Image: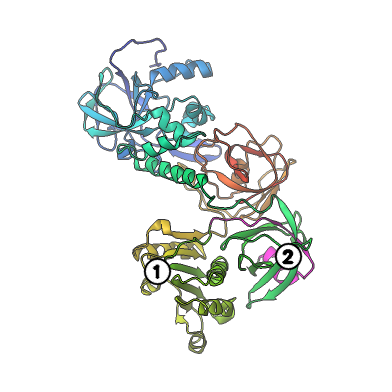
């Protein structure tokens, strides 16, 4: 049945259609999406239950479904609006993925916390629609997620207060007005559009009916607004793009690790860093095009030279070049130090936990604590195979000796008893059980760096020890964990050059993944180029709305199509709708 386009004139609001659909696999851009966005009308009564309507389901429960998002509502007035906008007349009920198509209940009048009785059931408004690419997939209009926000017609979710049957034709009776008078339109704009009113953000965090996820997002935005009103939380990068740094010294630290000291090529003093930041290098001598790699700084934040400590991997062309071929006087190009894995200015206990070469950023933090003559309780916890593979051990031990409340715990997994005794090290790997056995303080702030599995184990152990998750910080050397909502799991592949003939556009370097390639003329976005290279990606809306894909832009310029609703800050890029205007380096 095609949705009507003429005014119905119902007063009060009325339920026009109940729409349900179970998730299914849908082909999309060479991938498979498991989605429940295809909804179809049901004739006769339908039971509304706490988590769902009978016969309905969602494919991605991270963004849809659950108690707070049991029922999605969309208005026939918005149907008429989009029919005119897209010049289409083929819309059916359920076209926008909604469960309830209604006449009335406009987004700019319905408020978070409003309650409505429909048939035998009662519902409460919890949040606007989640901006998601799948509604564009369902409609065949990829830009629709951005349009729903930009045109202030998102629709909204409700939870089921009282279970019962509903059916088309039921009147919709308002039973309670939500506190705060925050409309669906206002809430949607607060999350996705610029020019936020801090007073409205604060109001939004105080509305009990608002779903917990949106409440947390608004708390984060409010915290960012408060930080912006005072001192910035993190300084801007010390320079834009790349600058030449001269190799001052290359020092072997262990059988597999060497430190590279870098000074300004023009002889000026380098800007101070923040303890824990990383340096992105372009290394001309290691290949063509010049590889781009990122390394944590292991030096003190105010040192005269920047120091990176590089582990030579068995098949690592770049690490091999840096540790065996690089000589003093050679030139490398460096982007300014960056990163949010930085030491806080607190006074409570601090845990520095690392494995292998993961000690480099936490060693920089240890330097800062020693330079401050900090009286914080400091725990240095590190795992290595044996002393010969434990770089910078003497340096860390000396720094810890200068701190009055320091604890040092070393674990060697492949050392002899004599080697362990010489270094006062414990036998075996640093595991979650061994970490928990140390009786670490539950009030500590933790910084963890090492392989992904190690960081996951340590995070689990730290939370079990009573440390709140927001006070556990981890640093990822390689590509960040992907966020690809709704996609069925694909076989994992190492990043590679994109298939097909080489591109002819600007050069794009993905720093974390070690891939440099050219953009294809007429290509849609950096995100799609990354996907073609099997580089782990993070996205949700794919139209410049949600900022899930935001990524540091280390050098170069981009253009946008479509334009994002809220442009990213300088030095950041929204990969889902960006195209390179010049050669660029992105932190992916």
Residue 195 seen by the camera: yes
Q: Earlier in the sequence, mark 2 or mark 1?
A: 2
**Residue 322 among those drawn in magenta:** yes
Looking at the image, which residue is at 35% across and 32% down? 157
In this rendering, position of residue 511 left or right of residue 418: right
Q: Is residue 78 above or below residue 349?
A: above
In this rendering, position of residue 482 left or right of residue 500: left
**Residue, disc 2:** 263
Looking at the image, which residue is at 41% across and 56% down? 470
Residues at marks 2 and 1 touching, judged by CB atoms closer than 8 Å: no
Magenta stretch bounds: 316-340
Q: Residue furthest bottom?
A: 418
Frontmost of labels 2 and 1 is 2
Number of residue marks: 2
**Residue, disc 1:** 432
Residue 132 seen by the camera: no
Of residues 245 and 236, which is closer to you in this image? 236
**Residue 174 among those drawn in magenta:** no
Instruction: Pinpoint residue 458: horizontal percent, then vertical percent.
Output: 43, 65
The secondary element bearing badge 2 is classed as strand
Instruction: Pinpoint residue 513: horizontal percent, then vertical percent.
Output: 62, 54
Of residues 56 and 50, which is closer to you in this image? 50
């Amino acid at each position: 049945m095609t949705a009507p386009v003429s005014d119905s004139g119902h007063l009060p609001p009325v339920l026009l259609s109940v729409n349900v659909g179970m998730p299914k696999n849908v082909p999309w851009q060479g991938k498979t999406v498991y989605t429940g966005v295809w909804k179809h009308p049901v004739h006769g009564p339908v039971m509304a239950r706490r988590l769902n309507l009978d016969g309905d389901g969602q494919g991605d429960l991270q963004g849809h479904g659950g108690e707070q998002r049991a029922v999605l509502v969309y208005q026939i007035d918005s149907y008429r609006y989009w029919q005119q906008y897209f010049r289409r007349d083929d819309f059916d009920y359920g076209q926008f993925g909604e469960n309830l198509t209604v006449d009335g209940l406009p987004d700019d009048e319905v408020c978070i916390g409003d309650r409505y009785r429909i048939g035998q059931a009662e519902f409460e408004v919890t949040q606007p629609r989640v901006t998601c690419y799948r509604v564009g997939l369902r409609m065949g209009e990829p830009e629709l997620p951005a349009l729903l926000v930009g045109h202030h017609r998102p629709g909204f979710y409700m939870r089921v207060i009282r279970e019962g049957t509903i059916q088309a034709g039921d009147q919709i009776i308002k039973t309670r007005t939500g506190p705060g008078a925050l409309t669906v339109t206002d809430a949607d704009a607060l999350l996705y559009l610029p020019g936020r009113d801090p007073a409205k953000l604060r109001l939004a965090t105080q509305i009990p009916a608002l779903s917990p996820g949106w409440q947390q997002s608004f708390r984060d935005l409010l915290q960012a607004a408060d930080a912006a009103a005072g001192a910035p939380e993190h300084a801007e990068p010390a320079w834009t793009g790349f600058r030449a740094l001269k190799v001052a010294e290359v020092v072997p630290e262990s059988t597999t690790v060497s430190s590279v000291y870098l000074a300004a090529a023009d002889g000026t003093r380098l800007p101070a860093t923040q303890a824990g930041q990383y340096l992105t290098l372009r290394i001309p001598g290691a290949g063509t095009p010049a590889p781009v790699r990122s390394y944590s700084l292991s030096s003190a934040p105010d040192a005269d030279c920047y120091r990176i400590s590089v582990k030579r991997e068995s098949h690592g062309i770049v690490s091999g070049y840096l540790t065996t071929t690089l000589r003093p006087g050679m030139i490398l190009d460096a982007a300014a130090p960056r990163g949010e894995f930085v030491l806080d200015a607190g006074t409570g206990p601090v845990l520095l936990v690392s494995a292998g070469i993961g000690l480099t950023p936490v060693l920089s933090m240890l330097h800062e604590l020693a330079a401050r003559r900090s009286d914080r309780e400091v725990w240095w916890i590190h795992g290595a195979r044996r002393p010969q593979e434990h770089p910078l051990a003497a340096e860390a031990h000396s720094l810890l000796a200068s701190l009055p409340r320091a604890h040092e715990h070393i674990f060697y997994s492949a050392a002899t008893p004599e080697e362990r005794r010489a270094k006062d090290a414990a036998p075996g790997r640093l595991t979650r059980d061994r970490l928990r056995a140390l009786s670490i303080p539950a009030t500590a702030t933790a910084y963890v760096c090492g392989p992904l599995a190690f960081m996951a184990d340590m995070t689990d152990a730290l939370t079990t020890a009573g440390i709140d998750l927001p006070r556990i910080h981890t640093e990822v050397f390689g590509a960040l964990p992907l966020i690809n909502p709704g996609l069925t799991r694909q076989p994992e592949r190492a990043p590679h050059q994109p298939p097909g003939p080489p591109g002819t556009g600007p050069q794009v370097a993905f720093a974390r993944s070690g891939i440099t390639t050219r953009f294809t003329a007429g290509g849609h976005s950096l995100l799609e180029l990354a996907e073609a290279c099997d580089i782990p990606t993070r996205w949700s809306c794919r139209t410049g709305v949600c900022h899930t894909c935001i990524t540091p832009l280390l050098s170069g310029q981009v253009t946008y199509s479509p334009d994002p609703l809220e442009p990213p800050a300088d030095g950041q890029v929204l990969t889902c709708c960006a195209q390179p205007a010049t050669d660029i380096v992105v932190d992916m």
